[in-house]
Image: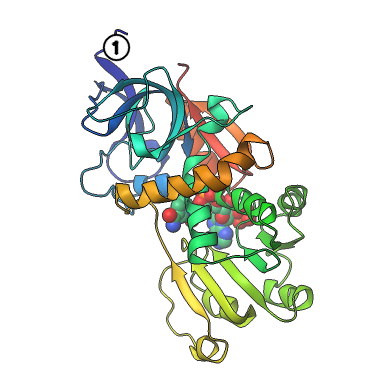
């Protein structure tokens, strides 16, 4: 296969709002050992991309400045030591570079496109599925029959978390910002949805699960910290994956941690080593890919935009007007 020498990609002209987004030309990258070159069909947009654009989430050392943490497409070249054949259609978790016509990925972080899904849908899978599976089940130790509260239920992360928690037998409460988002979360399987703008989630959880929650998956942070601790039950686990309302908590009472033997944990996916991410990929392949192949869980797509309209995609995500995922398509 003859590959072009140059490609289109998205770059940020410095740190700032969506207006720093522009399309640029760049050489098509070459895969080194263990890597594949993927002709990208689709790349999911994730909230961390907005943080990176604003200058608050720089790519880890060794990663390019090109945004994009996940993609789907077909393998067009391979580096040394890679078994995957060219022509294979895959989706992949990447540390950067997804917003482009061609991108490099670790072969160990490529997974097959689930049966019945298009590459556009598959491009919306890796970032949230890696993040949710690891945080909810490995760090949060969520088990069948337990109660979990998922803040931001209508987000890309939230829509994935609802489906996986239900598929593994948990009881799910979510928070979301409008009645429509709450209704959508219920159609995805949430047992209860709390409109956090008009209802007090601490009171509502107290009514729904009076013995307290087993796990909370939180992306809000800040003022939610003390409130989250107050509604965890004995041996409850708070899993922090982001802090939309701030990472500093000026003052909080640690007593509930001791009295209820709570665990406070959390993680970021991007900063992990390829081997650590490959371990998560292995678990997903074994435990979650069968569910995707059977259609029991699937990515929720809100909108697609051509690569050159990445700015509009970021504006939509910033408005929080979406439910589920926003995806960029290259036209490949
Ligand atoms: N730790 C990790 O490895 C990791 C990986 C990926 C993503 N994340 C984080 O997970 C979060 C979700 O990511 P995503 O890509 O799924 O984003 P997303 O689809 O844009 O979802 C974020 C949602 O949060 C809600 N929200 C926005 N601002 C808020 C605020 N100030 N207070 C409370 N809720 C707010 C909005 O829904 P409402 O209308 O309901 O308010 C919005 O839809 C982000 O914070 C992201 O940084 C972490």
Q: Pick out the residue farthest to the top.
A: 2
Q: Is residue 173 above or below residue 200?
A: above
Tag 1's secondary structure?
loop
Q: Which residue sits at x=28%, y=47%?
A: 59
Quadrant containing the N terminus is: top left
Q: From the viewer's side, name the closer residue of 39 and 67.
A: 39
Name the spot of residue 254 as percent of width and height, x first: 48, 88
Residue marked by disc 1: 3
Q: Which residue sits at x=51%, y=90%?
A: 258
Q: From the viewer's side, name the closer residue of 288 and 297.
A: 288
Q: Is residue 196 left or right of residue 83?
A: right
Name the spot of residue 202 as percent of width and height, x first: 68, 76
Q: From the viewer's side, name the closer residue of 154 and 13.
A: 154
Name the spot of residue 115 as percent of width and height, x first: 61, 28
Q: Is residue 308 above or below residue 320?
A: above
Name the spot of residue 196 as percent of width and height, x first: 68, 65
Residue 214, quarter of picture: bottom right
Dot 1, how many residues are within 10 Å of its Cα: few (below 14), some (14-19), or many (20+)?
Answer: few
Res. 191 visible in picture: yes
Res. 46 visible in picture: no
Q: Is residue 36 above or below residue 265?
A: above
Quadrant containing the C terminus is: top left
Q: Which residue sits at x=76%, y=52%?
A: 186
Q: Is residue 147 left or right of residue 56?
A: right
């Amino acid at each position: 296969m003859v590959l072009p020498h140059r490609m289109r990609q998205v770059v940020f002209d410095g740190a700032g709002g969506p207006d720093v987004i522009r399309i640029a030309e760049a050489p098509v990258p070459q895969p080194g050992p263990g890597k594949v070159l993927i002709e990208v069909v689709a790349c999911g947009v994730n909230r961390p991309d907005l943080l990176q654009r604003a200058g608050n989430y720089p790519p880890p050392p060794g990663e390019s400045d090109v945004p994009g943490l996940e993609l789907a497409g077909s393998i067009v070249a391979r580096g040394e030591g890679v078994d995957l054949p060219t022509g294979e259609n895959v989706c992949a978790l990447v540390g950067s570079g997804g917003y482009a016509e061609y991108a490099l990925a670790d072969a160990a972080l490529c997974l097959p496109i689930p049966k019945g899904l298009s590459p556009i849908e598959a491009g919306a899978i890796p970032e949230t599925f890696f993040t949710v599976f690891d945080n909810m089940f490995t760090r949060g130790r969520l088990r069948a029959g337990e109660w979990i509260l998922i803040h931001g239920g209508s987000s890309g992360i939230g829509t994935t978390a609802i489906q996986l928690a239900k598929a593994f037998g948990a009881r799910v409460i979510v928070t979301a910002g409008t009645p429509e988002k709450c209704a959508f979360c219920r159609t995805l399987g949430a047992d209860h949805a709390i409109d956090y703008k008009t209802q007090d989630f601490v009171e509502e959880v107290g009514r729904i699960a009076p013995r307290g929650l087993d796990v909370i998956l939180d992306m809000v942070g800040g003022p939610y910290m003390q409130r989250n601790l107050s509604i965890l039950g004995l041996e409850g686990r708070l899993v922090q994956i982001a802090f939309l309302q701030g990472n500093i908590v000026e003052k909080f009472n640690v007593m509930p941690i001791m009295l209820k033997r709570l665990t406070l944990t959390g993680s970021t996916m991007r900063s992990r080593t390829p081997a650590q991410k490959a371990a998560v990929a292995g678990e997903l392949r074994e435990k979650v890919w069968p569910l995707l192949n059977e259609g029991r869980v699937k990515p929720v797509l809100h909108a697609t935009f051509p690569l050159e309209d990445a700015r509009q995609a970021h504006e939509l995500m910033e408005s929080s007007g979406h439910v589920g995922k926003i995806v960029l398509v290259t036209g490949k």
